[in-house]
Structure formats: C-alpha cells, structure tokens
C-alpha cells in the first residue's frame, strides 16, 4: 500500500509497542510547536539518530487558489523564489546550500507550496538566513520574470503536452471537477502561462507570501527550546501580512449521473481503465457536505481491502484468478483542502479489451457492496496500514512532508494522530456503510485511455466538443 493517506505518524522517537494488531500502536512525544508574534507557526520533530535536519517552510497557497485565466501562478512563483534577493544574488542560494553539504528543492500542489533544505544541523542557521530572506525579499523584475515564464512553458511541453497520459488526465479532472479549482492543472493551462504578466506574479507573491501564511516544519536533531532563539532571530522580525485574504474553497455540486471520458491515442502502448468516485477528504465533504469524523480513516481502510496490494480483492480476482490485468488497485486521498476521490485503476493485459477488464473490476466492487468486507480483511488492513505508517517514519523527508501536508491543508496539530483512535474503533459495519455511501456509480467518472479502438472493446470514444 502506498502512503497517500499522508499525515499520519511522525518521528523516529515514536515508541513501537509489541503487537501491531493491539488497541494501541505507538506513543507520540516528540512533536513540539510554538508561534511567533507575527503569526508564523513552527513545528519541531526531534530525531536524534543523525546530526542532520530538514528545514522547510510551507505556505497555505497552491493551485486551488488561482483564478480562471491565471492558472499556474503558484507554480510560477515557486520558480521565481530561486531567482535571488538583494542579499543573495541569483544562483547564490544553490551554491551556499551545496557548499554546506546540503540539498534543497521545492514543490507546488493544489493546496500548498513548500520549500526545504536538508543539511547538517551545524548549517541550519545559514538555511534560516536564506529562507527567511526570500520570504518577502525577492528581487523581482520583468527581465527576470519573462525568461522564467518561458522555462515554465517549456516545462509544460516536456512533462505534460508530450505525455499522452498526462494530457488525458488533465481533461478527466477538468470534467470531474468542472466547478472546482482542482479541475485545472497545477502547472497551469498553456494559454494562461503565455498570458500572465510580471504584475500577476508580483501580486501573487505579495498577497500570499508572509509569516502569517506560513508554517515551518523542522525534522532532525533539534528541539523547540533550543531552536526558538534562532527562529526568532531570522523570522521574528518579518512583518505579518495582516490583510491576508480568507481562503476560498470551491464546492463541486452534485450531478444527476456519472461522467465518462474515453479516448484513444496512438502514443499509448498499454490501455488504462479508471473509475473515479467522489469522496470526502479530511476537510471537505462531497459537494460541500459537513465532514463526518472517522470517514477518511474508514475509506483508507476500504481502499486497502479493495485494492491495496497483491492480496487485495481487485488484484486477486483480476490479476491472479481471471488473468485479465497486469495490475488492479484502489487508492484514496484523504489529506486535501477540498473534496477528494476514491480511485479504482486497472491495467488490462495485452490482448484484453478495457471494457472486459473494467466490467470485471465493477463485478468485484458489486460483490463487496453485496456481501461486505469480512472481519479478517478488516484486521489485516489495520495491521498492514499501521505497519506501513510506522516504517515510514524512518525517512525525515517523509516525516516533514506528511506533517506539512496536514497542517497546510487545514489540520490541527493536536489532531494529527486521531486516525489511530479512529482506526481502532472501526468495525466491519462502519466500513461497509462507507462503501455503500460512496462507491456509487452515479457519483463517479469513468476514464479510459487506449492506444486504439480495439483496446477499448465495446466502449465508445468520447467526441471532442
């Protein structure tokens, strides 16, 4: 099972108890936090196994906050954050980090934008100097902006426009989230990249980058008490934004029936069949409904039982028994600001049409809805997911990423581990009720991409409008 659930457990100092299947799995006593007077939040995860630290700053802004015609600005600004300040010239930050034995990077999602460095603890102060300086001190000019806009446009051509799967899923999400800002790509539409201006980027930076819209996540051989003076020194003097706009979260309304987007592309070698169900996240219900505590954890369990690995129902039926597919899985994304998805994916074997493989997958789902999951499946899923999350703590970057994702999407630090209690309380009846509630075809999108019409079987290709 992958780690899509996101923010679950953190830190190497978590105490693993002897029995994974027991009522309690781990104790958490290594996460500390404090807040600066300017509104910046700081979270520290102590990990003393090595003299290193991952220093990151997360901004509560991403592609979901973009307006029509201005898609891609969050990602564009990420690029510009490496273009220098008055204090550190363009390219100097990279050289300093490398000379200090570190690595750095950044990433933009729908819900957040984050910047990080992984360095020896002795170099942390230098990293804070660099990162705090560019929080509000970028040296932006049109002469810097225009070449970088062309770089982003070329990036889109290389990573999206030249990739048939990426092109396809852009259009799938555009339909699935027709009224939601999750419906446009993080990198932005090509026409928008060509059209926005230096002023657009400058306004985005000025509006969203400041201490009161940021959270620092530190994972490594540091403590909150020891690091607070350094944080105050470099970040405490940055003025708060004060006029930070309230975050608007789109709502995708309910629709009368299911959607489908079925295409062929001669560049595609292997067909893919996907059923994307509407599902709540931890922070928004379907069509803006109120979030029900525990549902996200229950859907995570359901995804594990249905398609979380080689012992799950989809794989066993489609790959092992019927030999219709090379892979069959299900996935659920809980940590999102807006409404989420529960995805079922099948890669048919060569010579097996997508319709046949898809029908077999739907039969597995129908059987689950009719008969329900079993006590043994629930027990195995709990043990498996708890084990996965425990082992994931060994990577400081993963720790940083998951905690940052949680707090930047709207999670409260004190609720970071409520999933453990929720999972222990989950019953077969709870999981079955969630399956009945959310695995509804009329609330889903069918997405099929094949290399030719023969691979589609009886499915009809969607006509472009």
Image: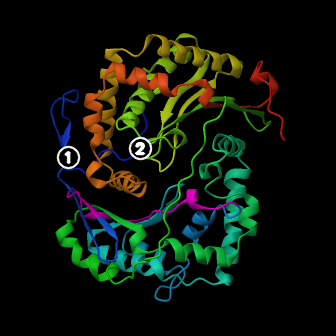
Q: Is residue 30 left or right of residue 428?
A: left
Q: Residues within 10 Å of mark 1 (few under 14, many from 20)?
A: some
Of badges 2 and 1, the one in the foreground is: 2
Tell me which segment is drawn in magenta: 43-68
Q: Is residue 232 left or right of residue 267?
A: left
Residue at 29% in and 47% down: 393
Residue at 53% in and 77% down: 206
Please say if 428 is above or below 270: above
- Which part of the image, by quadrant, shows the N terminus? top left
* Marker disc for residue 282: 2
- Residue 18: x percent and y percent? 15, 32
* Marker disc for residue 14: 1
- Secondary element under disc 2, as helix, strand or loop, is loop
- Residue 320: x percent and y percent? 52, 14
Magenta stretch holds residue 57: yes
- Residue 219: x percent and y percent? 29, 60
């Amino acid at each position: 099972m992958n780690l899509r659930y996101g923010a679950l457990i953190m830190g190497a100092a978590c105490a693993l108890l002897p029995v994974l299947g027991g009522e309690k799995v781990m104790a958490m006593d290594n996460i500390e936090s404090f807040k600066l007077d300017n509104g910046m939040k700081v979270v520290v995860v102590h990990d003393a196994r090595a003299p290193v630290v991952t220093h990151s700053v997360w901004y509560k802004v991403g592609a979901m906050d973009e307006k029509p015609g201005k898609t891609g600005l969050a990602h564009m600004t990420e690029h510009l954050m490496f273009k220098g300040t008055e204090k550190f010239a363009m390219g100097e930050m990279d050289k300093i980090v490398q000379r200090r034995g570190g690595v750095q990077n950044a990433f933009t999602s729908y819900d957040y934008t984050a910047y990080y460095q992984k360095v020896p603890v002795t170099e942390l102060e230098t990293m804070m100097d660099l990162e705090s300086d560019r929080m509000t001190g970028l040296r932006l000019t049109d002469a810097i902006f225009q070449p970088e806009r062309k770089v982003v446009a070329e990036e889109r051509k290389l990573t999206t426009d030249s990739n048939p799967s990426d092109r396809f899923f852009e259009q799938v999400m555009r339909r699935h989230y027709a009224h939601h800002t999750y419906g446009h790509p993080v990198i932005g539409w090509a026409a928008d990249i060509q059209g926005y201006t230096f002023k657009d980027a400058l306004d985005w930076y000025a509006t969203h980058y400041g201490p009161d819209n940021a959270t620092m996540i530190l994972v490594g051989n540091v403590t909150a008490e020891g690091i607070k003076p350094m944080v105050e020194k470099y970040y405490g003097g940055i003025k708060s934004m004060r006029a930070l706009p309230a975050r608007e979260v789109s709502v995708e309304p309910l629709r009368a029936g299911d959607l489908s987007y079925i295409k062929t592309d001669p560049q595609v070698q292997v067909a893919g069949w996907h059923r994307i169900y509407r599902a709540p996240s931890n922070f928004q219900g379907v069509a803006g409904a109120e979030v029900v505590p525990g549902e996200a954890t229950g859907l995570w369990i359901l995804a594990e039982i249905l398609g979380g690995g080689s012992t799950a129902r989809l794989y066993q039926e489609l790959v092992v028994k019927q030999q219709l597919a090379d892979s069959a899985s299900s996935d659920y994304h809980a940590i999102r600001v807006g409404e989420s998805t529960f995805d079922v994916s099948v890669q048919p074997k060569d010579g097996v049409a997508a319709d046949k493989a898809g029908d077999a997958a739907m039969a597995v789902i129908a059987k689950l809805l009719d008969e329900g999951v079993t006590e043994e499946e629930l027990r195995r899923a709990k043990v498996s997911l708890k084990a996965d999350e425990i082992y994931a703590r060994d990577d400081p970057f993963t720790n940083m990423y998951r905690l940052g994702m949680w707090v930047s999407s709207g999670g409260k630090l004190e609720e970071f581990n409520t999933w453990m209690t929720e999972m222990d309380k989950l019953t077969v009846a709870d999981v079955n009720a969630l399956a009945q509630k959310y695995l509804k075809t009329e609330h889903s999108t069918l997405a099929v991409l094949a290399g030719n019409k023969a691979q589609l079987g009886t499915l009809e290709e969607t006509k472009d409008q």
